[in-house]
Amino acid sequence: MPQNPTDVSSAKIVSAYEEILKKPLPEPEIPSKELTDEVPRREEKCSCAVMLSPHPDDECLNGALPLRMSREKNWQIINVAITLGSDRSRRNERKKELAKACTVLGWDCMLADENGMEDVTLAGRLETEAWQSKVDRIAGILMALRPEAVILPHGGDWHVTHVGTHYLGMEALAKMPEGYGCTLIKTEYWQPMFEPNLLVGLSGEDAATLISGLACHVGEIERNAYDRRFPAYLIDTVRRGERVFGKGKKAPDMTFAELYEIGTWSKGKYSPSALNRVIEIRSSVEALFE
């Protein structure tokens, strides 16, 4: 019989991955504040970024760049939880999980609505009066904070609430005064972006922080091990990063990364950056905002 071509070391790697997925991560033991729909106080001496997260856990799943912004340059990151998920029986628990996750990340957090917004979808967008009320609410938050950066899903991110959050945020920005401008950052998770222009590397320490934040979302990871699967996602993103650093070129020296599209919102219009940029672990994110 022919010898099994599978190398022993390869089999060990596969087995190690399988074992990792079988072992739940401990939930971080950290005190956290109760979340409300009150807008946090803007820190006057810091730049501010508002992150519009469709669900609790998206703040971690898309958190590479804002985490580096807060840790390296002391940006105030304010996560706005747009919904609390479709399972109404879980919403109080998801508030607690989200509060703990944002404490792990070191960010401020607020609820877009006391019990989460409903029908943040393209179908819900057709309910004109209710939709405009949601847009006005997000515009009011942006008006109060006047952030230097806004982070939201890209418009093709597959999940109906991710797509709805994209349009909600873009329409809220359109209500801002003409003189307002900011950096606009689009994220991906369920569906890759067609034209990302930014690859952001993560150190092992930063990746571990995002995973610890994910481990706070106990109800979600009980049904799907998002936290333990996340390192593989970050690793695979380096491979997909060829869409930014160039097809066929040598990959940058990083193990973990996330892809984004970055551009500017100015005079009521979004313009993506014409440059493809890679922010390596030893580089500074500050170059993105100069």
Image (cartoon, helix red, strand yellow):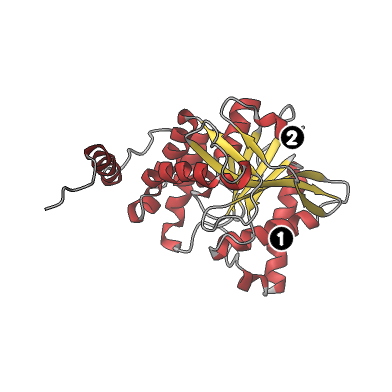
Q: Secondary structure at mark 1?
A: helix
Task: Please tell me which residue lies in front, 137 or 61.
Answer: 61
Instruction: Answer above or below: position of 14 versus 168.
Output: above
Say whether residue 31 is visible.
no
- The span from disc 1 to disc 2 (Cα, nearest Å) is 26 Å
Q: Name the quarter where the C terminus is drawn.
A: top right
Give the foreground label among 1 and 2: 2
**In terms of sequence position, does the residue under pointer 1 or pointer 2 come before the other?**
1
- The residue that mark 1 highlights is 135
Amino acid type, mark 2? Phe
Q: Give residue 215's quadrant in the image.
A: top left
- The residue that mark 2 highlights is 289
Task: Please tell me which residue lies in front, 51 or 251.
Answer: 251
Residue 99 location in percent, x, y? 50, 42
Residue 235 location in percent, x, y? 45, 41
Left or right for 231, reference 144? left
Instruction: Answer above or below: position of 49 versus 139.
Output: above
